[in-house]
Image (tube, rainbow, N blue to C red):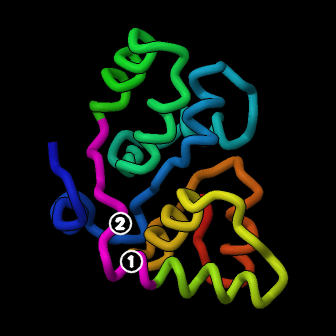
Amino acid sequence: MPCGRAAIGHRRARPSDVIIVDSSVWIGHFRAAETEPVRKLQTLEPELGPLLGDIILLELLQGARDAAQALLIEQRLRSFPVLSMLDADLAVKAAANYRLLRDRGTTIRKVADLIIGTYCIEYHHSLLHDDRDFEPMRIHLGLQVH
């Protein structure tokens, strides 16, 4: 299974086609929630199937009830390519984004959301989410949402 940023250029014709699905939507999907983001996930075209960030995989696995549920979640999600979402350059950009948002009166609650949002911004990927922390990134930083 492809891993890391290099896989993106080979997998997609255009970066704007890339969709990252946040853990907030995966959780809703696993719980059979009837929300707009979950419906969008379920209707994605196969060729536009989502990519999974390693940080998102971490969030989903750490929230599992026990090892058996974590294994089931991992097995279900391993059918999607897993991207490495953080390196030194992105860490610097994410910190700058945090400061910019803080200067504009918004504090992002979770570091993982800041990394995911910054990754999507830097690589021009759309984010499918159901989490209010991404809205300031959309407004002030240009995060593309699906």
Contact between labelled residues 1 and 2, with CB atoms less than 8 Å apart: yes
x and y, in percent, of residue 126 in the image: 51, 64
Circle 1 sits in a helix, a strand or a loop, which is it? helix
Q: CA distance from mark 2 to mark 1?
A: 6 Å
Q: Which residues are magenta?
A: 80-92
x and y, in percent, of residue 3 in the image: 19, 52
Q: As shown in the figure, which amino acid type bears the numbered disc 2?
A: Leu
x and y, in percent, of residue 127 in the image: 55, 59
Task: From this view, report whether residue 70 is shown above or below residue 28.
Answer: above
Indicate left or right for 12 with 130 as reference.
Answer: left
Circle 2 sits in a helix, a strand or a loop, which is it? loop
Front in this rendered view, residue 32 or 12 = 32
Q: Quadrant of residue 31?
A: top right
Mark number for residue 86?
A: 2
Mark number for residue 105?
A: none
Front in this rendered view, residue 40 or 95 = 95
Residue 102 in the magenta stretch? The answer is no
Indicate left or right for 20 with 105 as reference.
Answer: left
Residue 9 visible to the viewer: yes
- Residue at (40% x, 60% y) in the render: 18
Question: Which residue is identified by label 1?
Answer: 90
x and y, in percent, of residue 107 in the image: 76, 72
Residue 86 in the magenta stretch? The answer is yes
Residue 48 visible to the viewer: no
Q: Quadrant of residue 71?
A: top left
- Residue at (68% x, 74% y) in the render: 138
**In the current view of this chain or complex, which residue is farthest to the right?**
105
Q: As shown in the figure, which amino acid type bears the numbered disc 1?
A: Leu
Q: How many marks?
A: 2
